[in-house]
Amino acid sequence: MDELEDGNDGHGYGRPNGPDDDDDDPAPPDGQGLDIGHLDGNLRELHDAGGIVISELRIAQKFIAHLQGATLENSGLDEESIYALRHPSTGPLHVDADTLLSLKLYLATSTASEETYKSSRTAIMDRHPEDAVLTYEMVKKVCSASSGITPLRTDMCVNTCLAYTGPFSEDETCHYCAEPRYEPIAQPRQKKKIARQQFYTFPVGYQLQGQCRTVIGSQNLEHRQRETTRIQAEIQENGRLANYNDFYCGKDYLDAVGAGNIKDRDICLMFSIDGAQLYQHKKSDCWIYIWVNLNLPPELR
Ligand SMILES: [Zn+2]
């Protein structure tokens, strides 16, 4: 996400509190002082030729370094969520009658306020004290666990210039428009900084785990394994395939399976990304991506 306003060419380093405060703009023309430890391939050639002189490229280089060092621990997920990702439940999801009632109530009031859920819960329990309708906090957790919809919140600029990730993660003002990241401190004893704006990411791992929690979902995910076995048998018998109707028939895929790099229980995902300019006369672009689950039959992808 990147939006540059008039009067700011995006090449300055004028952030009041950024990590490059000692690097007053403009950026050093010869690229001196750059950490080039992570550079490789074309970027290193470009640097060696004295080519990295534009701050946008320097930022891109820092993002590459952060991506190379990415771990779950520095992803922003809390410890409980990371543990759940590494230790998925292996049994089918069991929902008792009270939990089902709570989930239905939660979904029915999802467009209303939190208070609506709480008032409805109180009304039900006044009439049926034996019903253990879940508290709002509990039902939110159950909903997240059963659906695999676990939000990861990230701070962003109020003008949508950037997300506070990678080289910007410690910044307190926007690199491009200088808007503050946090709300002003309301009370002298307030310790927690409150971001002015955040966006949500829903990591795909939890959603895949959620799909495995039902018998039908699990069977659908085994489609790739079943088809691969069939295709391998056909090639073994006839030396060729009669029909090429899915990516499973491709040589690169079958070689990867043969080499053991893709195993029976793995899930193959395709990452598809494209950029779009939203306004014809305004400098603005955004990138949209989707994950396609290639384990599923084509009609369910
Ligand atoms: Zn901004």
Image (tube, rainbow, N blue to C red):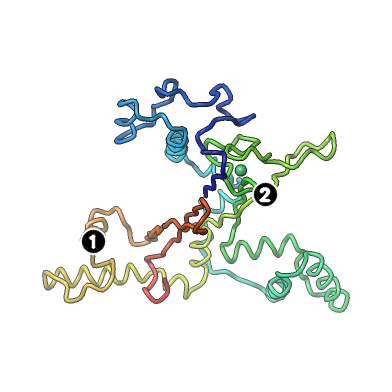
In this rendered view, identify the residue nearer to me: 264 or 157.
Answer: 157
Q: Residue 260 location, x and y as percent?
A: 27, 54
For ligand 1, tell me if the residue under mark 2 lies within 8 Å.
Answer: no
Circle 1 — which element? Answer: helix
Q: Can you tell which mark lies on residue 197?
A: 2
Residue in the image at 42% along x and 36% along y: 57
**Residues packed near mark 2 inside 10 Å, few (<14), some (14 to 19) or many (20 plus):** some
Q: Give the mark nearest the N terminus, 1 or 2.
A: 2
Residue in the image at 75% along x and 67% along y: 134
Give ligand 1's quarter of the image. top right
Q: Can you tell which mark lies on residue 175?
A: none
- The residue under label 1 is which amino acid type? Leu
In-image side of 148 versus 270 (left or right): right
Spatial CA distance of label 1 from label 2 is 45 Å
Q: Residue 288 location, x and y as percent?
A: 47, 58
Look at mark 1 in the image and give the residue it sits on.
Answer: 254
In-image side of 251 versus 66 (left or right): left
Q: Residue 161 location, x and y as percent?
A: 57, 46
Query: From what the image shows, is residue 189 above or below residue 294?
Result: above
Query: From what the image shows, is residue 150 above or below residue 54?
Result: below
Query: From what the image shows, is residue 121 above or below residue 57?
Result: below
For ligand 1, tell me if the residue under mark 1 lies within 8 Å.
Answer: no
In this rendered view, identify the residue nearer to me: 214 or 285.
Answer: 285
Task: Quadrant for the C terminus, please.
Answer: bottom left
Which residue is at the far bottom?
Answer: 127
- The residue under label 2 is which amino acid type? Gln
